[in-house]
Amino acid sequence: MKDIILKEVSRTILPFIHLFGIYIILHGHLSPGGGFAGGTVLGTGFILYRIVFGKDKAREKFQYSKLVKIMSIALIMYGTIKGYSFISGGSDLNWPGPPLGKAGNILSGGFLLPLNIIVGIIVSITIYFLYSLFEEGEI
């Protein structure tokens, strides 16, 4: 009986946990938070899913190969965007960049928003992987 209640409550609350994590990531350059904090919230949502529904169901939903591909792409994108911002911003080359917009708007931080999103992806997957390794006794 406890499992049914736990699963139903988790099924109801998990979308809100993930939505809150996404909110923290998207508003990180305007308020406290950012990629690391939002990624941590998303990662704990993934961990909650694994705890409640079991590792077999979590493995189906969060396939290791897909998560590694997503993380690899995110790391390459982070390196590319950060490298470009170092070269274009610090050398007075006046290369094109994202529009800065009006201060206080969601699209006002230049490269900060895409970098926050990428960091959130990396942190959430890393936290989920670390928990999975600990649970399975690999670490």
Image (tube, helix red, strand yellow):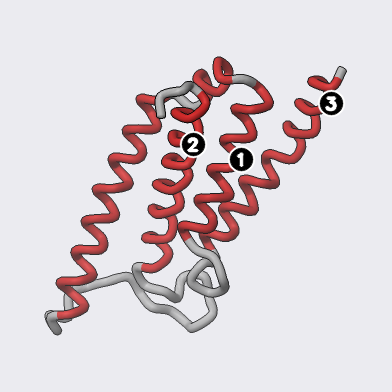
Q: Quadrant of residue 119?
A: bottom left
**Of the residues shown, which amino acid type is indicated by label 1?**
Gly
Q: Nearer the viewer, residue 60 or 106?
A: 60
Q: Position of residue 24 (x, y in %)?
A: 57, 60
**Of the residues shown, which amino acid type is indicated by label 3?**
Ile
Q: Position of residue 91 (x, y in %)?
A: 12, 80
In space, the residues marked 1 and 3 are separated at their CA atoms by 17 Å
29 vs 111, left or right, is: right
Q: Position of residue 134 (x, y in %)?
A: 48, 30
As helix, strand or loop, the secondary structure at mark 2 comes to: helix
Of pointers 1 and 3, the one earlier in the residue sequence: 3
In space, the residues marked 1 and 2 are separated at their CA atoms by 9 Å
As helix, strand or loop, the secondary structure at mark 1 comes to: helix
Residue 8 lies, with reference to residue 39, above or below; the image says above
As helix, strand or loop, the secondary structure at mark 3 comes to: helix
Of pointers 2 and 3, the one earlier in the residue sequence: 3
Marks 1 and 2 close (CB-CB < 8 Å): no
Pointer 1: what residue?
45
67 vs 61, left or right, is: left
Pointer 2: what residue?
128
Q: Position of residue 122 (x, y in %)?
A: 39, 47
Q: Callout 1: 10 Å neighbours few (<14), some, many (20+)?
A: many
123 vs 95, left or right, is: right
Residue 135 lies, with reference to residue 44, above or below; the image says above
Residue at the image position 52 percent from the left and 70 percent from the top: 106
In space, the residues marked 2 and 3 are separated at their CA atoms by 24 Å
Q: In the picture, which quadrant includes the C terminus?
A: top left
120 vs 57, left or right, is: left
Q: Callout 3: 10 Å neighbours few (<14), some, many (20+)?
A: few
- Name the mark on residue 5: 3
**Of the residues shown, which amino acid type is indicated by label 2?**
Tyr
Of pointers 1 and 2, the one earlier in the residue sequence: 1
